[in-house]
């Protein structure tokens, strides 16, 4: 097995989970995850860090939100 070479220095993962209305847990995708990703990417491009230094990726629920 050989190691994989990364194309970026760091990875930012944003939860974009879309749950149905009335679900027990909140839905990050319904609270601006897409807009946050777009804003973050534009700022990284402006700073010259996109796409070489950092990557922004939408993911499903990672179950790291604070418990109520």
Image: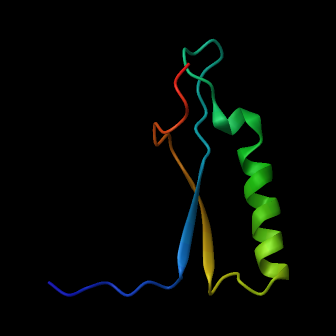
12 lies left or right of 48:
left
State the count of labels: 0
Q: Where is residue 63 drawn, in percent x and y?
A: 46, 36
Q: Name the residue at 56% across, 21% down.
A: 25
Position of residue 56 measured from the top left corner of the image (x, y, whole percent): 63, 66
Depth order, front residue of 42/9: 9
Q: Residue at x 26, y 85 (%)?
A: 3
| Left or right: 50, with 14 as reference point | right
Give the quarter of the image for residue 22: top right
For the N terminus, the quadrant is bottom left
Q: Quadrant of residue 65?
A: top right
Q: Is residue 17 above or below residue 5?
A: above
Residue 13, compared with residue 15, is above or below; it is below
Q: Residue at x 66, y 82 (%)?
A: 51
Location of the C terminus (image quadrant): top right
The colour scheme used here is rainbow
Is residue 68 depicted above or below 28 in this figure? Answer: above
Judged from this view, the residue extending furthest toward the left is 1
Question: Which residue is pictured at 62% across the width and 87% down the height?
Answer: 52
Query: Where residue 11 sits in the image (x, y, percent)?
Result: 54, 69
Tell whether 49 sits left or right of 13: right
């Amino acid at each position: 097995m050989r190691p994989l070479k990364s194309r970026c220095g760091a990875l930012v993962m944003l939860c974009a989970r879309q749950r149905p209305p009335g679900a027990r847990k909140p839905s990050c995708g319904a609270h601006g995850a897409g807009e946050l990703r777009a804003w973050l990417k534009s700022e990284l491009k402006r700073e010259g860090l996109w796409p070489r230094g950092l990557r922004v990726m939408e993911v499903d629920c990672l179950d790291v939100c604070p418990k109520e």
